[in-house]
Image (spheres, rainbow, N blue to C red):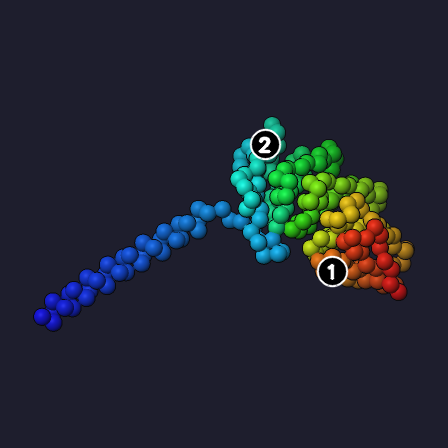
């Protein structure tokens, strides 16, 4: 009797372990094949970008995929997503995706333009080349640009929440999701940038002679000495 009970217990345990293994396997498979939504700063799943051989697809929690076809000879250099915004750099252009509008918007690069770095945030994109600084507003699905001077070089891109800033050797360029456009403040010849910090709605730049602040809903910089 004891041997029969032990055998029955072993059979039940084996079936239980097998069932558990099947559940775990199915759960793992569902994770592997489910869309990998990127997390926004607000904590919600929003947008992910999937590059393919001939197009890019933006997937949002609000609906299906939105495709943007690549042109003949065009290839993808880098791509990413954060919050409500998707970004793709190709050999010919920059693409920004707005989850709110469910649209891709492009800006074409010049023949001699070379892309440097980019800053991707939940509601905006900041990117620079050797000739321009570009900003994308997710809420409007709109690209804005400002030309760099002949000897101007971008050293930093920084941003948080609804505001971002590009630091060059000649000035600071503020950009926000609310006001659109770039707002600059020039450096004096002896001025050196010491730090760039910020929060959801303001960026603070400290230099060797002053502190300047750019707010997301302002049309310029505020100086504090």
**Location of residue 166 in the rendering, given as x and y in whole percent from the top left corner:** 77, 51
Q: Is residue 158 visible?
A: no
Compared with residue 135, is residue 207 higher up or lower down, i.e. above or below? below
Q: Is residue 81 visible?
A: yes
Residue that carries the numbered disc 1 in the rendered image: 198
Residue at 19%, 64% in the rendered image: 10
In the drawing, does residue 105 fall left or right of residue 131? left
Q: Quadrant of residue 131?
A: top right
Instruction: Tell me the number on the disc at residue 55.
Output: none
Residues 197 and 177: in front is 177
**Location of residue 184 in the rendering, given as x and y in whole percent from the top left corner:** 84, 50
Residue at 81%, 62% in the rendered image: 206
Marks 1 and 2, Cα distance to the nearest angstrom?
37 Å
Residues 147 and 40: in front is 40
Compared with residue 45, is residue 88 higher up or lower down, i.e. above or below? above
Compared with residue 77, is residue 205 higher up or lower down, i.e. above or below? below
In the drawing, does residue 50 fall left or right of residue 117? left
Residue at 90%, 55% in the rendered image: 189
Residues 100 and 104: in front is 100
Residue that carries the numbered disc 2 in the rendered image: 69
Q: Quadrant of residue 211?
A: bottom right
In the drawing, does residue 168 fall left or right of residue 127? right
């Amino acid at each position: 009797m004891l041997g029969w009970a032990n055998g029955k217990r072993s059979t039940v345990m084996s079936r239980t372990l097998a069932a558990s293994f099947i559940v775990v396997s199915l759960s793992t498979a569902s994770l592997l094949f489910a869309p990998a939504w990127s997390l926004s700063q607000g904590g919600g799943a929003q947008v992910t970008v999937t590059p393919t051989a001939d197009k890019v697809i933006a997937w949002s929690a609000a609906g299906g995929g939105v495709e943007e076809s690549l042109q003949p000879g065009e290839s993808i250099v880098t791509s990413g997503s954060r919050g409500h915004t998707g970004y793709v750099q190709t050999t010919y252009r920059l693409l920004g995706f707005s989850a709110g509008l469910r649209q891709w918007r492009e800006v074409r690069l010049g023949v001699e333009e070379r892309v440097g770095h980019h800053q991707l945030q939940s509601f905006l994109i900041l990117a620079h080349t050797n000739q321009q600084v570009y900003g994308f507003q997710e809420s409007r699905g709109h690209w804005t640009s400002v030309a760099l001077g002949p000897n101007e070089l971008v050293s930093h891109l920084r941003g948080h929440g609804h505001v971002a800033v590009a630091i060059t050797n000649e000035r600071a360029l503020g950009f926000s999701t609310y006001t659109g456009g770039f707002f600059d403040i020039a450096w004096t010849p002896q001025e050196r940038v010491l730090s760039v910090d910020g929060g959801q709605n303001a960026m603070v730049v400290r230099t060797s002679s002053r502190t300047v602040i750019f707010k997301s809903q302002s049309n310029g910089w505020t100086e504090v000495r």
